[in-house]
Image (cartoon, helix red, strand yellow):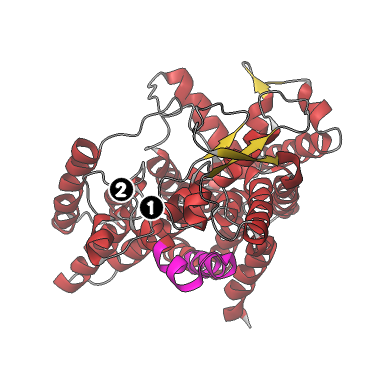
Amino acid sequence: MKKYWPLLIIFFSLLIFSPALVNFFSSDDWFHLRISQINNFGDFLSFFSFFPNDHSAAFYRPLSTQVFFFVFQKLFGLNTLPYYIFVFLVFGLSLFLVYRLAQHVFNNQKQSLLALLFYSFSVTHFTRLYFLSAFQEILMTVFVLLAVLTYFKKPSWKIDLLTALFFILALLCKETAIVLPLILILFDWFNGHFRPKRLIPLLLILLPYLYFRFIYFGQTGGDSYLWDFSLKKFLNTFFWYSLWSFGAPELLVDYVSGGFKILPRFFSDFPFWSKIVLSLTGCTLTSFTILLITNFRKIEARKILLSLGIFLFSLSPVLFLPLHKFTLELTLPMIGFSFFLTEICSVKRSWLTSLFVVLFVILNLSMNLLTYQTHYTVNRSRIAQKVYQYFTSNYPQYPQDRYFEFINDQNIENKIWGVSKQVAFAVGGDNFFQVLYHKKGIQAFYQDLPEEKPKNKQPISINSSIFLP
């Protein structure tokens, strides 16, 4: 029976996040669907080019975005269920690999199961499971874990070649995979034997990758991608990633001002949930603090340093981007944090340990429910699905010499987010229509996003409020 415990934890984790299976496309999904529509093998190869082209995205993640959306769009069209089923299967694989890595670190089944429990039930998985464009995170983590576990095997040229292959695949999923060599060095230290020759192939891959990625492909622009190396910003960013790792909801960052004061509108926006969030988070952090102080002298320093090292190294690509902090980035770092919590809890069995584990699970499960009720991935997918159903029923063919215009037929309190703007963000502006009608250059217009409209075409005005959930 004991051998089935990991599968049972993985099953319940998938069950917790299973409402994502009925989610639809939203936002960036439509952009990725559009750029992955190709006609020949040359276009397919362009997915992997470091030179920007018609099928490039803002980031270099061809395997987890363009290839993923291309294959599933060819096989299943705009039926999202197979997309999400595949994402869940890969996520389940990542959980199993986390368990395997925990076995290597702790060499104890109960501790490995506890690490798996912390990781599997974490609310930080929400966005990457409800948002298809975030599949990059899951697939990248799978290949990084496969590289690490392969690296542990008896050294041979075949093993080193396989490790390098997994590293390449991870880099094709997301840029943050560059931290793999640092993680392997950390494990070499943990295992008591440093093997620099085995890292040479990885460096021979990494250096050309960095050159082509940042020199030829270019860096991403935008206000949220501004580097800030000040200690104050670093500590603030690290604080939030740590707090989210315990299970605090991502939305809390929008309601905390300088000095970590809770803004009054948090209580007015969430009269019920504000009490739940603060009380559960406070109790969880308090129980952990007491547990840490109580067990401090008995903690195995090597495992703590390994765990925190994985957490910090994995976060390092985003720790100096204070305006770009999201729980989405915690896929790989959360492994280290789960190991950290496990070591703290494993020093001594007590009622306090059990209390912390129970509070952690309750906090993350309840915040999963709150996130489901408030997160943009859910709300925007509902809007996008209504738009899709409306246009496939009323306009199965694109009307020539006309254009679609979404108007604000309803006033809302938040003037920044007009009704038509909500629709625009849900369908990715023009991207939805270019995907639906398989035609480049189609434009749609939104009252909240004024643009010059074609003078030789007649508008088809559509009330935006009919698409709101």
- Place of residue 309 in the rendered image (x, y in percent of width and height, measured from the top left): 40, 44
Q: SS for tag 2?
A: loop
The quarter of the image holding the N terminus is bottom right
Q: How many marks?
A: 2
Q: Which residue in the protein does label 2 denote?
A: 54
Mark 1 and 2 residues: CB-CB less than 8 Å, in contact? yes
Picture residue at 64% right of the left edge, 74% below the top: 8
Q: Closer to the camera, 177 or 128?
A: 128
Q: Main secondary structure of the magenta part?
A: helix
In this rendering, the answer to whether 16 lies above or below 469 is: below
Q: Closer to the camera, 26 or 168?
A: 26
Q: Does residue 194 belong to the magenta stretch?
A: no
Compared across the picture, whether 361 is left or right of 60 comes to: right
Q: SS for tag 1?
A: helix
- Place of residue 29 in the rendered image (x, y in percent of width and height, measured from the top left): 50, 51
Which residues are drawn in magenta?
70-95
Decide if residue 38 is in sight here: yes
Disc 1 residue type? Answer: Ile
Q: Based on the displayed image, in which of its 4 quarters is residue 116 positioned?
A: bottom right
Picture residue at 30% right of the left edge, 55% below the top: 172
Q: Which residue in the protein does label 1 denote?
A: 35
- Place of residue 462 in the rendered image (x, y in percent of width and height, measured from the top left): 68, 42
